[in-house]
Amino acid sequence: MTKKIVLASGNAGKLREFQQLLAGCGFEVVPQSDFNLSNAEETGTTFVENAIIKARHACQQTGLPAIADDSGIEVDALNGRPGVYSARYAGEGATDEANNQKLLQELSNIPASQRTARYHAVLAYMRHADDPTPILCHGTWEGIILTEARGQGGFGYDPLFFVPTHNCASAELDKAEKNRISHRGKAMQELLQKIPHA
């Protein structure tokens, strides 16, 4: 029997990645939009706090176990910005393109050697809204911010995120390879070891 888990996100790109990563593991990942859930207020200042807030909100509203992901990109030359504000870096409801443009502007005078960055993903799995021991998993992915967008795949900052190990932008990787090496892929592999299987 497949176990239903709510994905506490309205992000279509994240939903596709989760469905691919959890395929064949006995879980049916259902987006919170299937329940007409509002998005939780992300009031935390860390990825961990926001992931827990989102997972708890989805559990409360649906009565099902939930997985929430809070992720973003940390750029060394910007003292870790955009960080937890990655999705709304250019303002509330900003598009990926607007966020990417803002990042390029902020780094316009920064040489390639100082454009180091990393993606972070924190996953929180909660069995129910009052779960006192949520499972937390953290994955990171090192890269360099390009001076212009490359590739058509992925979402978010992927067109600007150069992956030195593969000599291409994240947006140029095929999906399976991205899922294997990315911050979210690493956190998900860890979660699959810890989550009680269906």
Image (tube, grey):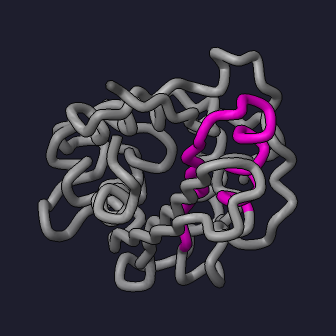
Residue 19 x, y percent position in the rendering: 35, 31
The residue at the point 22 percent across, 42 percent down is 172
The residue at the point 48 percent across, 49 percent down is 157
Res. 82 visible in picture: yes
Q: For this rendering, which residue is in front, 34 or 130?
A: 130
Please tell me whether residue 127 belongs to the stretch shown in magenta.
no
The residue at the point 56 percent across, 36 percent down is 7
Q: Which segment did they paint magenta? A: 50-74
Res. 151 visible in picture: no
- Which of the 4 image quadrants contains residue 104? bottom right
80 over 191 or under it: above or below:
below
The residue at the point 25 percent across, 39 percent down is 25
Residue 73 x, y percent position in the rendering: 53, 64
7 over 135 or under it: above or below:
above
- Which of the 4 image quadrants contains residue 134? bottom right
Farthest residue toward the front?
A: 1
Residue 64 x, y percent position in the rendering: 63, 35
Quarter of the image for the C terminus: give it: top left
Please tell me whether residue 64 belongs to the stretch shown in magenta.
yes
97 over 35 or under it: above or below:
below
Quarter of the image for the N terminus: give it: top left
In the image, taking residue 131 as reference, residue 72 lies left or right, namely left
In the image, taking residue 178 as reference, residue 88 lies left or right, namely right
In the image, taking residue 42 as reference, residue 197 lies left or right, namely left
